[in-house]
Image: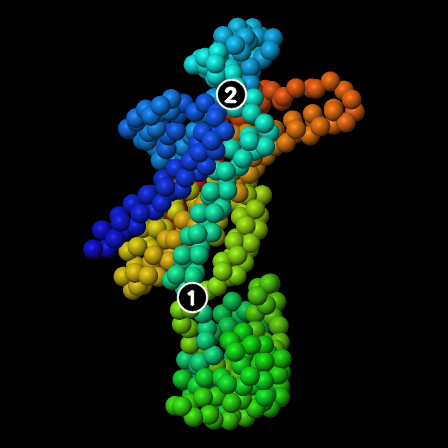
């Protein structure tokens, strides 16, 4: 049963990835069709074609390697006026070097099937705002899909959060020093004083009603009241078995680990109660804040990717331990999905929640990484179009001749270099996910 659940988790995740890729490419296809750009191919995956069909002028299909996709918008590479006759679609090139030959071959491939009447349907001939919409819609779909998946997970299923009820009582006060900051939950010793909660008579099941006369609404408020009370007597009203009981604990100042710096400790009020957790559905605001914090974390991850990949590479050869919060490949994410699905002690709803969040995070990453202003990412085309638009606007304001469009074909060496870099990073991550995988256990 566990093996079957594991396989099901991997398959569901793979289907979610394929669906996300298909929607991303659909984000290019639909506005391309709306703006009458000639679209010749729409494929999910790379490599050998498993299935395809032709509808009108467009071939739709699925390929063997589900790690990407593409939508062929004719005219992404503009012709060279000195080498091409756009009306006839014939390209004559001069082979003067490796990169020049690459550019020439790309132009030839781009216009191989262009007919004279297709001139106004070529991508580079469309208004700048239409090109921005076509290129940016794929990114927008990934971000919207991430928001929808987060909403289903947080608003539909919910997350476990502490309530104002008490589930357990600390038996003693354990002081934390810099030497044992990472092990603050050691067993009580005879020399440890009793916790204020135990001394005051708190019991499991008590629900906080007020603290020093202030009504309690959530656990965060309970924590703030306890911490700010320091070493003073407090008046706490709890609800116990349908009746209100007033308790008078004297909180103590205890040292606890600093959440921002594990090498430091802080001093704050301590009572010694553990809250009961319960699954609670969240609001739209929670989804928005999650998208905001997730976006910032993803941007940081993208910026630190070279450094993180270095550590992943070291971990793959046994030189250090794999960081569970570091980057993983699609293969690694699939393994995590399989482990999530095969967790017998976790409810189906909670397993579905984890897979939804995993797919949401993947879509958030895909959307943001595609905004990188370099080819072959969508952000490269967006940046080129914006540069061309600004350059033409400045020329008009200065009364100078139109400088024309930007020849994106000259960026093909950058495209190939980035493709090699992406392939290298993928190989490192996939290899690490096989020999030193990130595991939930």
Sequence order check, earlier mark of 1 and 2: 2
| Residue lying farthest to the left in this orientation | 1
Q: Circle 1 sits in a helix, a strand or a loop, which is it?
A: loop
Residue ID at (45%, 88%): 239
434 on left or right of 252: left
| Vertical arrangement, residue 295 with respect to residue 180, above or below | above
Residue ID at (35%, 35%): 66
- Residue 71 lies, in percent from the top left, at 43, 29
In which image quadrant can residue 177 be found? bottom right
- Residue 396 lies, in percent from the top left, at 74, 24
Q: Circle 2 sits in a helix, a strand or a loop, which is it?
A: loop
Q: Nearer the viewer, residue 346 or 371?
A: 371
Q: Which mark is residue 281?
A: 1
| Vertical arrangement, residue 41 with respect to residue 217, above or below | above
In which image quadrant can residue 115 be found? top left
Residue ID at (44%, 81%): 166
Report the residue marked by disc 2: 122
Q: Is residue 323 visible?
A: no
């Amino acid at each position: 049963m566990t093996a079957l659940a594991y396989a099901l988790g991997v398959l569901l995740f793979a289907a979610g990835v394929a669906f996300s890729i298909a929607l991303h490419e659909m984000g290019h296809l639909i506005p391309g069709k709306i703006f009458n750009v000639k679209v010749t191919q729409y494929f999910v995956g790379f490599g050998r074609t498993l299935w395809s069909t032709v509808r009108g002028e467009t071939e739709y299909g699925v390929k063997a390697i589900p790690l990407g996709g593409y939508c062929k918008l004719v005219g992404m590479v503009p012709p060279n006026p000195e080498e091409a006759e756009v009306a006839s679609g014939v390209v004559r090139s001069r082979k003067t070097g490796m990169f020049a030959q690459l550019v020439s071959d790309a132009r030839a491939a781009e216009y191989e099937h262009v007919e004279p009447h297709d001139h106004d349907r070529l991508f580079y001939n469309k208004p700048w705002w239409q090109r921005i919409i076509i290129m940016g819609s794929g990114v927008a779909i990934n971000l919207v899909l991430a928001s929808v998946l987060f909403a289903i997970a947080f608003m539909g299923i919910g997350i476990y959060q502490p309530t104002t009820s008490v589930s357990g009582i600390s038996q003693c006060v354990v002081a934390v020093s810099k030497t044992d900051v990472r092990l603050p939950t050691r067993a009580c010793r005879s020399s440890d004083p009793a916790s204020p909660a135990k001394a005051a008579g708190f019991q499991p099941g008590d629900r906080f009603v007020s603290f020093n006369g202030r009504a309690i609404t959530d656990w965060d408020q309970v924590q703030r009241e306890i911490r700010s009370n320091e070493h003073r007597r407090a008046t706490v009203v709890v609800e116990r078995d349908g009746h209100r009981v007033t308790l008078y604990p004297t909180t103590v100042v205890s040292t606890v680990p600093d959440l921002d710096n594990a090498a430091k400790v802080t001093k704050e009020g301590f009572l010694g109660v553990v809250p009961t957790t319960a699954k609670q559905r969240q609001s739209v605001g929670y989804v928005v804040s999650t998208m905001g914090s997730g976006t910032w974390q993803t941007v940081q991850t993208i910026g630190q990717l070279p450094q993180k990949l270095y550590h992943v590479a070291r971990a793959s050869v046994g030189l250090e331990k794999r960081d569970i919060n570091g980057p993983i490949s699609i293969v690694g994410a699939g393994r995590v999905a399989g482990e999530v699905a095969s967790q017998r002690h976790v409810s189906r709803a909670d397993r579905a929640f984890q897979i939804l969040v995993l797919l949401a995070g993947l879509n958030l990453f895909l959307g943001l990484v595609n905004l990188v202003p370099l080819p072959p990412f969508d952000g490269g085309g967006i940046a080129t179009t914006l540069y061309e638009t600004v350059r033409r606007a400045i020329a008009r304001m200065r009364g100078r001749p139109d400088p024309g469009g930007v020849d994106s074909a000259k960026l093909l060496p950058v495209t190939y270099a980035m493709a090699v870099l992406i392939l290298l990073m993928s190989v490192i991550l996939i290899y690490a996910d096989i020999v030193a995988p990130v595991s939930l256990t």
